[in-house]
Amino acid sequence: MIRLSEDAILGLMAKFRADSSPLKVDLGVGVFRDAHGNTPVLECVRAAERSVLAEQTTKSYVAAAGRAEFNDAVADFVLGAAHPAVRDRRAVTVQAPGGCGALRVGAELIRAAAPASAVHISDPTWGNHAPLLGSSGLRLLRYPYYDASAHRLRTDAMLEHLNGAAQGDVVLIHACCHNPSGADLGADEWRAVVEILQRRRLVPYLDLAYQGFGEDVDADAAGVRFVAQSVPECLIATSFSKNLGLYRERVGALIVVGNDASHAAAVKSHVLQIARSIYSMPPDHGAAIAAHIFATPELRSLWMSELAAMRGRIREMRGLLADNLRRLRDDDGYGFLRSQKGMFSLLGASTQAVDRLREEHHVYMTADSRMNLAGVMPQNVAYLADAICRVMD
Ligand SMILES: Cc1ncc(COP(=O)(O)O)c(C=O)c1O
């Protein structure tokens, strides 16, 4: 058996660790960082974890669907309690091991129900989408999404591509905070995409990994809610890795919206069978923490304020980097950093420029020039902006 090459992001992390320069800047790894460069445990999580541990009387199995109270709370959080799909019991929610687990279970469901369907993923997209969905055996196609050198959505090309998709194909859409571009669909684009989904009878698969990192928890779910009330069927993979900082606890869920309550219940039975055949049951600890926070008003409001602080820091660093670049260059060519959403944006640099940033300036980002803006600090932003100008100009 040949040895596989190192995962790109793990290789980047290793290079960063081995770099002894005090100037080094990590914009590579996709986790939130506070102003000290730490990825903190949220206070609401610490408090909930204490209660969970104090109240837990057994470590016996929960269920293949995970915790019922977690699943109910997640459906309300993502779709809103008054959403027609929730009200009419057309939405079924199954806890999964993180957003990745949810994406994979959803892919297996598609593969079982419609093996000939292709899944259309955005170009560019998060590096793990193709492996997660493709390894279920589904055929993947890419729709144009973002022009990294012009720093804008490729709306017309995207709509043209989707117009050519075959009936029953699946379209994976980043619900908010597009990874890696930070460029989200606006209300007009959502409407145009939904019109095509309806007309071409395509099945949307929404990836909601950053709810609360863009505008706020409701605005970030607006696209998902709109889609879920406009089409007969859709899938939603959600994650609490980022917005609750529960990365290693593996907390996520797959929501499937079906035609009616009995269709949704039938789909759920298949989802559970798939889960049983892959990992049997999702891990409970993180979901117990999340469920406790959902059910405890003081902890929920503490969470919302901690989430607002994370979002605020990312926005502030976006603004600070754009301002520094504007000062150095005398133009606002990087102004897109201010308006893009979530942790990531694409610098729009060549791989050579990315290599130079790393080798000459100790600035680390992935080869596609994705920057994690949470790696920007007031103390490194001037240095970072200067390094960017040196390789880009
Ligand atoms: C676009 C996107 N989807 C899904 C995920 C899944 O995250 P996790 O499995 O850690 O919950 C991530 C994490 O980086 C992501 O960026």
Image (tube, rainbow, N blue to C red):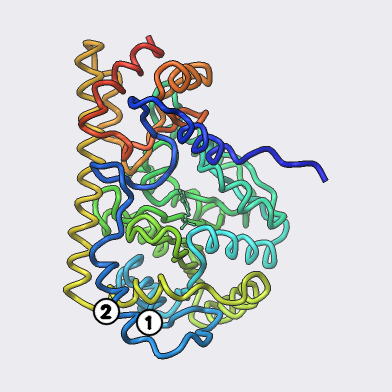
Residue 193 spot, x, y in % from top left:
45, 47
Residue 82 spot, x, y in % from top left:
29, 74
249 horizontally vs 5: left or right: left
Give the residue drawn at x 50%, y 53%. Answer: 197
120 horizontally vs 291: left or right: right
Against 135, residue 338 (above or below) is above
Residue 358 spot, x, y in % from top left:
46, 23
Q: Amino acid at mark 2?
A: Ala
State the residue in front, 47 or 122. 47
Q: Secondary structure at mark 1?
A: helix
Q: Secondary structure at mark 2?
A: helix
Residue lying furthest front: 20
Q: Which residue is mark 2?
A: 295
Residue at disc 1, CB closer than 8 Å to ligand 1: no
For the C terminus, give its image quadrant. Answer: top left
36 horizontally vs 256: left or right: left
Residue at disc 2, CB closer than 8 Å to ligand 1: no
